[in-house]
Image: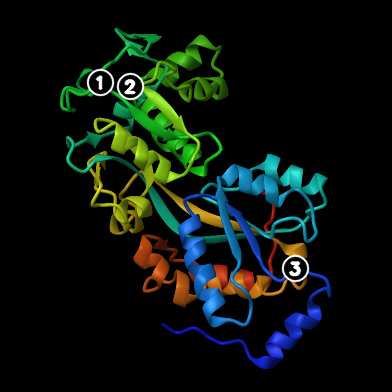
Amino acid sequence: MRYAKLTVSAIAMAAAASAADARDQVQVTGSSTVLPYATIVAEAFGENFDFPSPVVEGGGSGAGRKKLCEGVGETTVDIANSSSRISQSDIDLCAANGVNEIMEVRIGYDGIVFASDVNGAEFALTPSDVYAAVGAQVMKDGALAANAAAQWSEVNPALPAQEILVFVPGTKHGTREVFDTKVIVAGCEETGAFEAFKAANGGDEDKAEELCMELRTDGRSVDIDGDYTETLARLDSNKAAVGVFGLSFYQNNTDKLRVATMSGVVPSTESIAAGEYPVSRPLYFYVKKAHLGVIPGLKEYVEFFVSDDMAGPDGPLAEYGLVSDPELAATQAAVAAETPMGPLE
């Protein structure tokens, strides 16, 4: 693999730009989905550059963005990893705390998969199946009713006759946002529940979507606030359960997990890159621009992360499971120019 060493002059310039009392390690927090990728990059960075390895922590996308927005200065983090896009409320919080310029860096794509114990039954799911299994209210005999389904075969006769138990990411995780919008709301629409919610609320589509995303509270749907390793441990203790994971986590645990198809498509880097797998999402990290030139190695780390050597189709991130971004060159150019993100579209 080709890793470029910084020249002595480049190191000198970085040191000159740094405040004399600046901490010497880049600090990264956020998404548990992006965590393994950031860890791979941080370790390679420490081995190949004359800067210490960045400190990389998890905690969830929302929590990471909140930390990024706590303010500017050495006691605040430099980067927030995120498996969902930053929200306007995040941007407003940042602005209120003096974080006025943020760089948005898209590193590639990932999928969300449904998986069960490797020796368990095979699942061929659709968004409507998942919604009918875990939605709080579902369509029954043409009307909304509290969800009382106990087995997957009650939802769809083609599914296994086993108890419904789904471990889903907690609300602080970026994966949950994609799960909600691309699976739950999509399934709600497919089953007709969205239109029923809308009709019951005077045509209010926002309220209908909110009601679609309400999940069962009778133990059939269980929020997991930890990372994917906790979900995996829960599956190990509940062999009939189904868990929600990032594609890369599944690919690195195929000896323990059996993945479900979604709408007839097997999740893979190839099916995501081709746009065939329906539950995929871009992955990001957000950089506090005010820390560039102050925290030693921050700019170099960001550039290294999105380099062809790391984030390209033949790099170690793709080997771990990241779907390389076809527009990576544009991201590299924006990073080199230190271009802050504009208003959300």
Q: Amino acid at mark 1?
A: Val
**Residue ID for mark 2:** 132
Distance in Å between CA atoms under marks 2 and 1: 6 Å
Label for residue 41?
Answer: none
Distance in Å between CA atoms under marks 1 and 3: 55 Å
| Lateral position of residue 239 relative to residue 145, left or right | left
Mark 1 surroundings within 10 Å by alpha-carbon count, few (fewer than 14), some (14 through 19), many (20 or more): many
**Residue ID for mark 1:** 155
Mark 2 surroundings within 10 Å by alpha-carbon count, few (fewer than 14), some (14 through 19), many (20 or more): many
Name, please, the residue furthest toward the bottom: 8
- Inspect this view and state whether residue 333 appears: no
Q: Are marks 2 and 1 in contact (CB under 8 Å)?
A: yes
**Is residue 200 shown above or below 263?**
above
Among numbered discs 2 and 3, the one appearing first in the sequence: 3
Q: Which residue is at 17% across, 35% downward? A: 121
**Is residue 171 shown above or below 197?**
below
| Lateral position of residue 166 relative to residue 91, left or right | left
Among numbered discs 1 and 3, the one appearing first in the sequence: 3
The local secondary structure at tag 1 comes to: helix
Q: Which residue is at 41% across, 34% downward? A: 168
Q: Amino acid at mark 2?
A: Ala
**Between tags 2 and 3, which lies in front?**
3
For the residue pair 188 and 215, the one nearer the viewer reads as 215
- Inspect this view and state whether residue 74 appears: yes
**Is residue 191 shown above or below 100?**
above
Q: Which residue is at 40% across, 45% downward? A: 229
**Residue ID for mark 3:** 23
The percent coordinates of residue 6 (x first, y second) are: 61, 87
The local secondary structure at tag 2 comes to: helix
